[in-house]
């Protein structure tokens, strides 16, 4: 789970920095991609914490 979290956080960081660099090719999907990545991290952590 730690590897997946690290990858997703890195992807979120890249998605947040791209528009600041003037690269707007993912601008239409940027909000969705960030929301989905955060949701995957949250669900993964919940599953790990509540697994018996």
Image (tube, grey):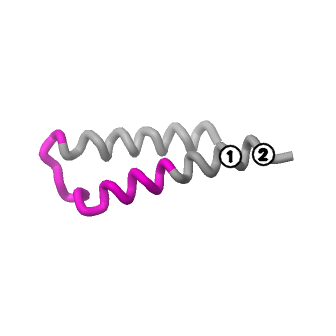
In the drawing, does residue 41 fall left or right of residue 52? left
Q: Secondary structure at mark 2?
A: helix
Residue located farthest toward the right when viewing the structure as drawn: 52
In the drawing, does residue 49 fall left or right of residue 36? right
At 33% across and 55% down in the image, what residue appears?
31
Q: Which mark is residue 6?
A: none
Q: Secondary structure at mark 1?
A: helix
Residue located farthest toward the bottom when viewing the structure as drawn: 28
Give yes or no for residue 37 being in the magenta stretch.
yes
**Callout 2 touching callout 1 (CB < 8 Å):** yes
Q: Nearer the viewer, residue 49 or 13?
A: 49
Q: CA distance from mark 2 to mark 1?
A: 6 Å
Q: Which mark is residue 46?
A: 1
Instruction: Measuring from the top left, give residue 22's x and y in whole percent.
Output: 12, 45
Mark 2: few/some/many CA within 10 Å (<14, 14-19, 20+) = few
Which residues are the magenta region?
20-38
Instruction: Measuring from the top left, give residue 34's x and y in whole percent.
Output: 39, 51
Instruction: Measuring from the top left, give residue 12's x and y in whole percent.
Output: 39, 44
Q: Nearer the viewer, residue 39 or 22?
A: 39
Tell me which secondary structure the magenta stretch mostly adopts.
Answer: helix
At 62% across and 51% down in the image, what residue appears?
43
At 49% across and 42% down in the image, what residue appears?
7
Q: Which mark is residue 50?
A: 2
Give yes or no for residue 22 being in the magenta stretch.
yes
Q: Quadrant of the N terminus?
A: top right
In the drawing, does residue 52 fall left or right of residue 19? right
Residue 26 falls in which quadrant of the image?
A: bottom left
In the drawing, does residue 27 fall left or right of residue 37? left
């Amino acid at each position: 789970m730690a590897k997946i979290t690290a990858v997703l956080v890195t992807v979120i960081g890249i998605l947040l920095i791209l528009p600041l660099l003037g690269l707007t090719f993912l601008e239409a999907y940027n909000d969705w991609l960030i929301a989905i990545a955060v949701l995957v991290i949250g669900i993964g952590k919940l599953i790990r914490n509540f697994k018996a």
